[in-house]
Amino acid sequence: MPNPEQAPTRITMGAEELIGRIRGRRGGSMKDGRDSGRLKLRKPCVEDGAGISALVESSKPLDPNSTYCYLLLCRDFAETCVVAEDVAKVGTADETGGAGEIVGFLSGYRPPERGDVFFVWQVAVDADTRNFGLAKRMLREALKRPSTRGCRFLETTISPSNEPSKRLFTSLARELQARCEVSACFSESHFGSRDPEEDQRADPKAGHEAEYLFRIGPFDLERMR
């Protein structure tokens, strides 16, 4: 039986080493004319956690979380998360996962008290794999799964400066022929900033923008299945 006090140490050391190897190996672009059909979408597994962490950290303006957080998402929320791997590149997952390099990740979940909602937390796409519609492909993949059956609304939060995410989700709303309503959600003060403008003057990298709720729906997912 594994020692519960030692197990976290083994996971952390492996993740840090793996992140370093991934950062050093990233190379090769899908913009060089190769077929974007080499991308494979699937559910994440625990072996993907370090690769996902490295991808999100390199995908500004997303907020990076701990590798442990992504390990939990891979273990407990795989049914509502999506990994995109480039099968033409050597990956990091073992036989339980994929063989390609992780170039995209979508995390989402169904809020316990709102069963008709699918909430999208993060959508990350590797810089060399952008402009191929991968983010929307991952959204479609999540919405077609049995795990999102019965959802009539999709929600996410977006900061005012994140124009690519605004375009992505308003485009999805049009595709679903549904309304997209925007409302206040988390203010700067919720992120610990007492005076956002003063924080920015003191340190341009300080503070956190407000996050606005984008609510798409109602829609009929049966048309996508």
Image: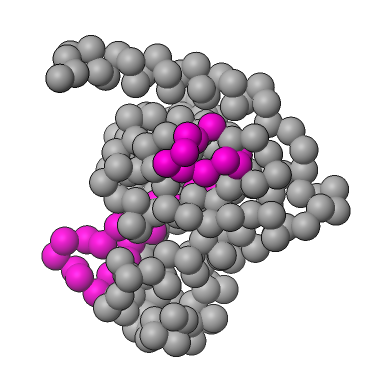
What percent of the width, then of the height, locates residue 60?
56, 40
Q: Is residue 120 left or right of residue 165?
A: left
Q: The C terminus lies in which quarter of the figure? A: bottom left
Number of labels in the image equals 0
User: What residue is rendered at 69% in x and 49% in y?
Assistant: 129
Residue beneath the point at 14% across and 65% down: 113
Counting from the top left corner in percent of width and height, residue 62 is at: 49, 42
Residue 6 placement, left or right of 157: left
Q: Is residue 213 visible?
A: no
Image coords of residue 1 (percent x, y): 15, 19
> Which of the 4 quarters of the picture holds residue 223?
bottom left
Q: Is residue 90 above or below residue 175?
A: above
Q: Is residue 116 visible?
A: yes
Please state the extent of the stretch shown in magenta in the rendering.
92-121
- What residue is at 52 percent from the left and 44 percent from the top? 98
Residue 146 higher or lower than 211, as above or below: below
